Image (cartoon, rainbow, N blue to C red):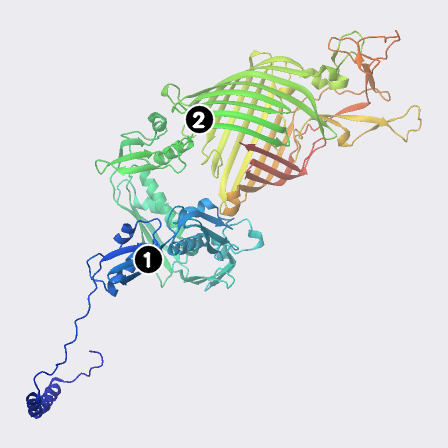
């Protein structure tokens, strides 16, 4: 018992003996007194009554007060109190605990009235609505799933507190550690409430400073550059990596270790990484404590192959690392992967390559032995295709570079996966799974695909600096009937061009690796020139035709495509603008003095029968947005197998992509072409090459190459004889009509470096790039130039479409009548062209060079491209342009 003093057994025995002796003496002394009391007791006297037993309350009834939604019997069922039981305070307390545990009641009490037990409750209200206020950065659809309370549920304060904590945690995940949530309750009738969460989001908690302690070899700036987390600076406003993220903090520790291991510091470790929130909760200060250790070099590096097909010595001699090189963990990982792939190419699918390290701390060297463990040669037992509901099995199987029964080849498996992904029918992260077969030397390849929509319906509208307003509509199915066929139709309309196209492509004709396709189209194009920045339509070209094409693969990356095209071309000029009857014979013809000889020679109807062949090599990693690989094509077309034009046209193009400087994408491209007539023909204006925007930025559309400038001639105010003035040639480009006439040869080169931005900018779809373009258009026969008389210029009478002369009517309108109502002669309706002189410029193979900055933006309105370019080198006659853009939208 609490308060007792512990005594040994001997002492306790002596003490008990003494107490017993004293007690015995007392009792002996008291016996005479007791006897005397008994003798003196008189009959009839009242004796003292014994104490009463404690009263026991039995529960007679249970009643409930305050119930609204719940039945009284239901409330009673939540408690262990029952009629006929004994009522105690402990039982009443237990009943209250049971009622509060249901979370249905705001308050509850139990009282006893002579066996009639009364339970009085106040029910928790029902939630009418959940309202979020103040959340701008995180929308309702992100917060509501985190909230456990919902309309028509019972309101409890514990759930509100839990929901508040969840919302705050959600903001912390977004880097907003200063966010606060204040729940408010709005009481309504019928015991209902609205729960309002008033959110104060606060600023995003940035990483103000990253401190590194213990680094001697590398500076703080170098190490920060290896981290994903960046310090918040003005220059990093596009980056989302400036916000604090605990997961990113752990990842940065791995990045630091990886960096040091690639530099030879095998003993490097991060001792601690601490993130401290500033008192204002707006910023974090991160401090790393590191231990660099000593720098190691490679010692003895060799391969120990236990597979008989591989010679250890020859493989050791081909290892990329040599004795004495600084240790590099990345080189070790790459070597393991290369050895595994090498074994896989020879059929050893389950080859196990394990590097064995021997660290020599005295000499600071690292000996490595790559052990290539023995493994059986594996053969493909079966290829399984799962998950395809629309696509036929053969569409997937024909992309496999391996067949059942073939020796396993890891390169073939990887190439098969890339070909299936390039179809565009399935998920982007598709991989071919490898499973053990029925025997150790058997493997099962399993293609678990997840189909995605392949039909495309697009309506678009936009504005282009080239075409002005643009409308287009297209529909395409890239996996028609699940056979991998492509069917499409498109319509495009703008101020200066209209086109309609139908196409069909069969990638495997009769289940053979031969592709075929057909295109039918109609294209109407209005050519133009510029005068004072105004675009003026010159000739119109209407082309109706179609093409057939057949392609065969020559190797895994090389293919040959043959094509035949038949075009019906109609080139015309506006007769009212460019036709005249200068000799007065009543016949209106294209007048070179008005249109230019080169335009008059271009009009007419012609038929082009074109046979072509394209040899193409393509190993790009992504056809839509490549980051590495090479694409080369060479096309030759011969016109003259029928038709009315004869020429040979050859074009070539090559593009190479590299991933450099940690996700910078560098691309170099070169292309060129030449067209030569034969059979005594000349190359038509409409068949020549043209160069300018958008092919070479920094120049206007068709702004590079041969052109005819029609320069006005005015009287020289300083002429000696005013009656016979000398002509002054206008050189102001805004007052000169500029007609590009194309060239028979061109070349074009481009170097572009795409700059990676932070994840925030990537989410916006921003992709800036620096570029340099080089090109030229040349090799065309000089046209016959025109010059109007000076100083009178050119004047001629206009005629209607029937060739009748036009006169000025009484009301000022044009008429074919020669006299008015009073039989007076009407004045001829004449057109006057000011004096001019044509000059031919730009036929030069000298390179034009431009540099600039461009930005691609996947805006909410559609793809947007803007370029700022400056021409470093140009030739006389070239038309430069510093700014260009193109934007469209889809709906």
The picture places residue 411, in percent across and down from the top left corner, at 36, 36
Say which residue label 2 marks: 478
The image shows residue 44, relative to residue 331, as above or below, that is: below
Side of 231 where 826 appears, left or right? right
Of circles 2 and 1, the one toward us is 1
Quick one: label 2 or label 1, which is nearer the N terminus? 1
Give 541 or 470, whichever is nearer the viewer: 470
Quadrant, the N terminus: bottom left
Q: How crowded is mark 2: few (under 14 residues within 10 Å), some or many (20 or more)?
A: many
Task: Check disc 1: other Cα within 10 Å, few if <14, some if 14-19, many if 20+.
Answer: some
Outermost residue, front direction? 44
Instruction: Tell me if residue 43 comes above or below residue 281 in the rendering.
Output: below
Percent coordinates x, y for residue 154 in the rendering: 37, 50
The quarter of the picture where residue 840 lies is top right
> At 52% across and 34% down in the image, what residue appears?
655
**SS at mark 1?**
strand
Q: Where is residue 650 in the image (x, y as percent from the top left)?
A: 56, 23
């Amino acid at each position: 018992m609490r308060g007792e003093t512990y005594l040994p057994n001997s002492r306790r025995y002596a003490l008990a003996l003494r107490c017993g002796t004293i007690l015995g003496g007392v009792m002996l002394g008291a016996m005479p007194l007791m006897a005397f009391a008994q003798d003196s007791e008189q009959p009839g006297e009242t004796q003292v009554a014994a104490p009463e037993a404690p009263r026991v309350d039995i529960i007679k009834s249970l009643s409930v007060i305050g119930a609204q939604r719940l039945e009284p019997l239901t409330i009673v069922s939540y408690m262990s109190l029952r009629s006929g039981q004994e009522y105690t305070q402990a039982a009443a307390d237990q009943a209250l605990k049971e009622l509060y545990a249901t979370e249905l009641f705001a308050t509850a009490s139990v009282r006893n009235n002579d066996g009639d037990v009364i339970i009085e409750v106040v029910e928790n209200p029902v939630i009418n609505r959940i309202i979020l206020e103040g959340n701008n950065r995180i929308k309702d659809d992100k917060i509501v799933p985190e909230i456990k309370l919902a309309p028509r549920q019972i309101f409890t304060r514990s759930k509100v507190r839990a929901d508040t904590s969840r919302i705050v945690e959600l903001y912390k995940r977004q880097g907003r550690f200063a966010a606060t949530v204040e729940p408010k309750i709005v009481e309504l009738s019928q015991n209902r409430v609205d729960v309002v969460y008033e959110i104060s989001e606060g600023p995003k908690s940035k990483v103000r400073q990253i401190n590194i302690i213990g680094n001697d070899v590398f500076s703080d700036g170098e190490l920060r550059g290896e981290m994903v987390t960046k310090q918040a600076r003005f220059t990093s406003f596009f980056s989302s990596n400036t916000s604090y993220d605990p997961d990113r903090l752990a990842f940065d520790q791995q990045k630091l270790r990886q960096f040091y291991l690639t530099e030879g510091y095998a003993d490097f470790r991060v001792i601690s990484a601490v993130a401290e929130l500033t008192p204002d909760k707006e910023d974090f200060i991160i401090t790393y404590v590191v231990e660099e250790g000593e720098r190691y070099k490679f010692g003895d590096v060799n391969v120990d192959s236990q597979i008989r097909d591989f010679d250890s010595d020859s493989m050791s001699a081909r290892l990329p690392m040599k004795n004495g090189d600084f240790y590099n963990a990345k080189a070790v990982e790459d070597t393991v992967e290369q050895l595994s792939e090498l074994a896989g190419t020879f059929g050893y699918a389950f080859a196990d390559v394990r590097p064995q390290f021997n660290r020599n701390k005295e000499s600071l060297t690292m000996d490595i032995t790559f052990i290539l463990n023995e493994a059986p040669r594996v053969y493909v037992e079966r290829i399984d295709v799962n998950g395809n509901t629309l696509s036929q099995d053969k569409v997937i199987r024909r992309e496999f570079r391996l067949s059942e029964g073939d020796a396993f080849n890891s390169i073939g498996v990887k190439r098969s996966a890339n070909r299936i992904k390039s179809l565009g029918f399935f998920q982007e992260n598709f991989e071919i799974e490898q499973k053990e077969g029925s025997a150790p030397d058997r493997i099962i390849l399993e293609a678990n695909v997840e189909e995605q929509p392949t039909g495309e319906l697009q309506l678009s509208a936009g504005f282009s600096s080239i075409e002005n307003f643009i409308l287009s509509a297209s529909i395409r199915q890239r996996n028609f009937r699940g056979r991998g066929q492509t069917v499409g139709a498109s319509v495009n309309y703008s101020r200066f061009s209209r086109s309609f196209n139908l196409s069909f492509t069969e990638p495997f004709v009769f289940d053979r690796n031969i592709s075929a396709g057909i295109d039918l189209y109609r294209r109407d194009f209005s050519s133009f020139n510029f005068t004072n920045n105004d675009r003026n339509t010159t000739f119109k070209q209407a082309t109706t035709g179609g093409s057939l094409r057949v392609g065969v693969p020559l190797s895994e990356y090389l293919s040959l495509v043959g094509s035949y095209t038949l075009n019906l071309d109609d080139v015309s000029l506006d007769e009212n603008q460019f036709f005249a009857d200068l000799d007065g014979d009543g016949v209106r013809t294209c007048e070179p003095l008005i249109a230019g000889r080169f335009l008059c020679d271009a009009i007419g109807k012609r038929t082009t029968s074109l046979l072509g062949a394209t040899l193409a090599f393509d190993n790009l990693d992504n056809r839509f947005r490549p980051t590495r690989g090479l694409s080369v094509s060479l096309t030759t077309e011969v016109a003259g197998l029928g038709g009315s034009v004869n020429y040979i046209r050859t074009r070539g193009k090559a593009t190479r992509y590299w991933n450099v400087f940690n996700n910078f994408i560098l691309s170099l491209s070169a292309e060129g072409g030449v067209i030569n007539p034969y059979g005594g023909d000349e190359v038509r204006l409409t068949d020549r090459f043209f160069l300018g925007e958008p092919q070479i930025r920094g120049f206007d559309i068709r702004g590079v190459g041969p052109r005819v400038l029609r320069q006005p001639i005015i009287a020289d105010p300083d002429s000696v004889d005013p009656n016979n003035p000398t002509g002054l040639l206008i050189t102001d480009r805004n007052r000169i009509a500029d007609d590009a006439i194309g060239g028979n040869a061109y070349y074009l080169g481009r170097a572009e470096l795409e700059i990676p931005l932070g994840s925030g900018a990537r989410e916006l779809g921003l992709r800036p790039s620096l570029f340099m373009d080089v090109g030229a258009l040349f090799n065309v026969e000089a046209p016959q130039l025109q010059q109007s008389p000076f100083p009178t210029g050119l004047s001629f009478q206009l005629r209607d479409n029937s060739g009748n002369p036009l006169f000025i009517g009484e009301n000022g309108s044009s008429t074919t009548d020669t006299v008015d109502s009073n039989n007076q002669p009407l004045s001829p309706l004449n057109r006057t062209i000011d004096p001019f002189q044509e000059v031919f410029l730009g036929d030069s193979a000298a390179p034009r060079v431009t540099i600039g900055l461009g930005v691609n933006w996947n805006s909410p309105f559609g793809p947007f491209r803007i370029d700022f370019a400056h021409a470093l080198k140009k030739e006389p006659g070239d038309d430069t342009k510093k700014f260009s853009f193109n934007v469209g939208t889809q709906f």
